[in-house]
Image (cartoon, rainbow, N blue to C red):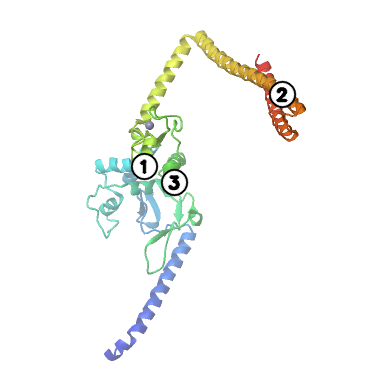
Amino acid sequence: MDSTQGDNEFTPFRNIINEWYAKDTSKKIRAVKKAKGMAGEHIGSHAPYGYRKNPDNLKEWLVDDEAAAIVREIFSLCVEGYGPTQIANLLTDRKVLCPTMYAVSKGLKQPSVIPEVPYQWNATVVAHILDRMEYLGHTVNFKTHVKSYKVKKKIDNDPSQWKIFRDTHEAIIDQETFDIVQKIRQGKKRPTKMGAMPMFSGLLFCADCGSKMSFHRRVDEPAEKHSYVCSNYRRNTNACTMHYIRNVVVEQIVLDNLREVIGYVSQYEDEFIRMVMDTDVRQRNKELAKQRKRLSEIQTRMKELDNLFQRIYEDNISGKLSDDRFMKLSKGYDTEQADLQEEQTQLQKNIQQEE
Ligand SMILES: [Zn+2]
């Protein structure tokens, strides 16, 4: 196709050929990569931060002591309770080179975009390090795939599609530490809305309007700011005033109170037991008195019903009350009496038991 004339005619055709070729090459490269990956070889172009490729055998990863120390520190900070953002801030403050700039400084990478601040760590990078099984000494292949030879964007594979090859290189993190970190991270990833229920939820009431205090928090807020707010006010700001109490304050009050009670109990154990028993007895006596009162009410009403029945019976005999009316009234009295009889039996049984 050296004729300049034919060039234009053939261009579309050549483009198609080129495309086929690119597709085919891409397929071949992927096939080779896949075969390597299935055989447990490292298929990434770089070793993860903390490792370096052995210059004598590029398939082999060696521990990079300088970066490995940072990886270990990141894991132990996580175990100590630091979140990825806090860890990132810590490393940034200490001017530790971020993984990309570290690789650049070692001549391993020529990134398309060079970070503005070479020490700028972020939570995503830290979280990614905390997730990597590679630090246990395992090779994990096929964590991502590219959509096609045209779209280079990496797409995450489901972990069920990963191929894991154990003990292919020296570990930086021990299994125990790694497991603890995964547990901590799982806890963090759970949606906060479904997370731990606030301890006093449903137990606090507004002193002014008596409605429930509802728990209120924002994801980005520190725990000290979580608070209970009058739900009446929250629904309608005119209904009550802005009553709120912070969760930490409630916890402190309850804790102080508990301490006081426990202190009292340990000092005056006998008095405390007597007090609790007294309260219990008083409570039960109150309940008993209520039942006795109801019982006497029932008995009075039953006597009344007897008298009423007597009267309508006489009125019916004397002709003052029609048979129809008599039947209706007597049926009503009968039903009421049967209900009362049942309640009376139940109450008598309860009272007898209590006594
Ligand atoms: Zn209120």
Task: State yes or no: discs 1 and 2 in contact (Cβ < 8 Å).
Answer: no
| Figure quadrant of the N terminus | bottom left
Callout in the foreground (3, 1): 1
Q: Where, by quadrant of the figure, is residue 336 drawn?
A: top right
Q: Identify the residue at horizontal 27%, vertical 89% (top origin).
A: 4
Residue bearing the label numbered 3 = 136
Residue shown at 28% from the left, 91% from the top: 5
> Where is residue 10, by image quadrant?
bottom left
Q: Amino acid at mark 3?
A: Leu
Badge nearest the viewer, 1 or 2: 2
Q: Position of residue 40 (x, y in %)?
A: 47, 57
Q: For ligand 1, which image quadrant applies? A: top left
Residue 130, percent from left and from top: 39, 45
Residue furthest front as drawn: 319
Q: Is residue 306 above or below residue 193?
A: above
**Residue 311 marker:** 2
Which sits earlier in the primary sequence, circle 3 or circle 2? Answer: 3
